[in-house]
Image (cartoon, helix red, strand yellow):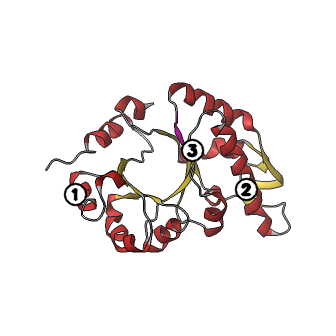
Amino acid sequence: MPQIEAGINTPCAGGKFYQDRLINSFIGTEGRVITGEIGYDSFPLVKDAEYLSAIQKDLWFAFPSPGELRLNNRYYKDTDEVLPALVSVYHAMMRSMRDRGIFGHILHCDTPDKEELEALAGQKVFFFSHRETKKNLGLILEYQDILAVRSSALGVVAEIMDDYDIQKIILVDAREEDLLRALEFRDAEHLICGGYCQDSCDQYWKSVVENASVFR
């Protein structure tokens, strides 16, 4: 894994590209259409977890949040049944992977959903929103005390700092000037440098490590 080779302390596998594999593991769906009671085949996810855990212990894994899958319902008569069914499957999937050595999961989304946060956020599951608005970040912080944001959203974080108990801020793609800015309102022990790469990642992760320092 490029992250491990680059020296990333807490590597994470999966991401958006894992979406198709996730959907293909579902039972009761045809492509992105729900045609029956939703379940899942644990075998491919468990094999992935075992393979990755053999490479690196305490690895994190990223999934799209349930709503990001954009599944079409043609089975449940009451649409309010869809999310609870998906949440149940997510709980089972993530638990089966943790049982095989995955430490925790990151659920990424464009816009966070309150019901998903209530049902899924916890010590070993946290949400990352690609749309870092004050509303979205505030909603996430109602359910978790870790916040992952790009450095461009530091101004928003500074605005809401006093309203929430933020224990850790993961700064995505931060440079020295971003870290210095973050240190103006948060101590160093509460800051973590992180990354989010979708392709051509070898050099990317090396740059994340190189930029994770401040010289004063």
CA gap, disc 1 and disc 3: 29 Å
Identify whether 187 is placed above or below 58: below
Disc number for residue 104? 3
Q: Secondary structure at mark 3?
A: strand
Can you identify the residue that label 2 sits on? Answer: 86
Report the magenta residues as a range: 58-62
Q: Is residue 112 above or below residue 126?
A: below
Residue highlighted by disc 1: 180
Residue at left offset 60%, top offset 33%? 101
Q: What kind of residue is marked 2?
A: Leu
**Residue beneath the point at 83% across and 54% down:** 35
Write the residue at 48% across / 74% down: 135
Residue at the outermost left position: 216
Q: Residues within 10 Å of mark 1 (few under 14, many from 20)?
A: some
Of label 2 and label 3, which has the lower sequence position?
A: 2
The residues tagged by marks 1 and 2 sit, at their Cα atoms, a distance apart of 41 Å
What's the mark number on residue 88? none
**Which of the two marks, 2 or 3, is nearer to us in this view?**
3
Mark 2: give few (<14), some (14-19) or many (20+) Cα within 10 Å.
many
